[in-house]
Image: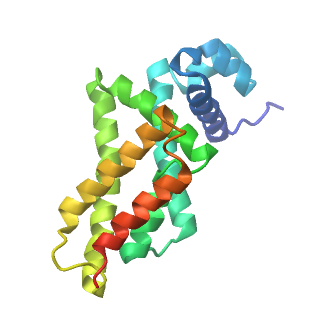
Amino acid sequence: MPKIVDHEARRRAIVDVVWRLIAAEGLDAVTTRRIAEEAGFANGTLLYYFPTKDAVLDAAFRHVVEATDARADAADPDRRGLDGLRTLCLEIMPLDAERLAEARLAVTFWQQALHSASRAALHTRSTDRWRAELAARLAEARQDGTLRADVDPGTTADELLSALVGLQVLAVLSPAQTTPDRQLAQLDALLTRLRAP
């Protein structure tokens, strides 16, 4: 009887290997031979799931974004207002080894996106989703009376997204200066400035 293969599980295993390799060793470490070795599959098996290195890198970036969203959903599936906004921010920020590894992959992906319209579009779709959620949480805070009256949700969502991306870059490039404590202090100071008196 032929062996039943869970193709989705294999895809996930390959993507998991790839994003961790990129985070730990950089893009040059991602070869089909190395991926197959780390995933425990035959080299030819990879081509069935990902025909090119670009395809697997795109999948790895999507995985990191989806993992962030899943953590935020698990932490607070009904997040709302400023507390809900803080929940999403915490899952984007590189506050532990897992999220720092995700930031490393994101920085690598951004460098690739500089010369790839499709990668730039993938990045834009991801950040647009986060920007929309940040703006929605701020709009809810306004409805709840917890947001200062002079705060514009759209502009502030842009500011927050820029700060979050900046923290990812800084944590990757200057980890000694971008500690979790300093990141949290920045986020909480920003949220304090947004709160209605």
Residue at x 49% of width, y 35% of height: 172
Query: In which quadrant of the rendered image does the C terminus lie?
Result: bottom left
Closest to the observer, 132 or 3: 132
Residue 152 in sight from this viewpoint: yes
How far across and how far down the image is residue 58, in percent? 44, 31
Task: Provide residue 190's location: percent of width, then percent of height.
Answer: 34, 64
- The front one of 24 and 180 is 180
The image quadrant where one finds the N terminus is: top right
Residue at x-position 47% and y-position 66%: 87
Picture residue at 48% right of the left edge, 51% below the top: 93
Measured as percent of width and height from the top left, residue 35 is found at 65, 21
Residue 149, picture quadrant: bottom left
Task: Specify the quadrant of the image occupied by residue 24.
Answer: top right
Side (left or right) of 188 relative to 27: left
| Residue 91 visible in the displayed image | no
Instruction: Kindly give the residue lying farthest to the right in the view shown.
Output: 1
| Nearest to the observer: residue 52 or residue 61 | 61
Quick check: 192 above or below 145? above
Which residue occupies 52% across, 47% down?
94
Above-or-below relation of 127 to 115: below
Number of numbered discs overlaid on the protein picture: 0
User: Based on the displayed image, in which of its 4 quarters is residue 139 positioned?
Assistant: bottom left
Q: Is 54 placed left or right of 1 in the picture? A: left
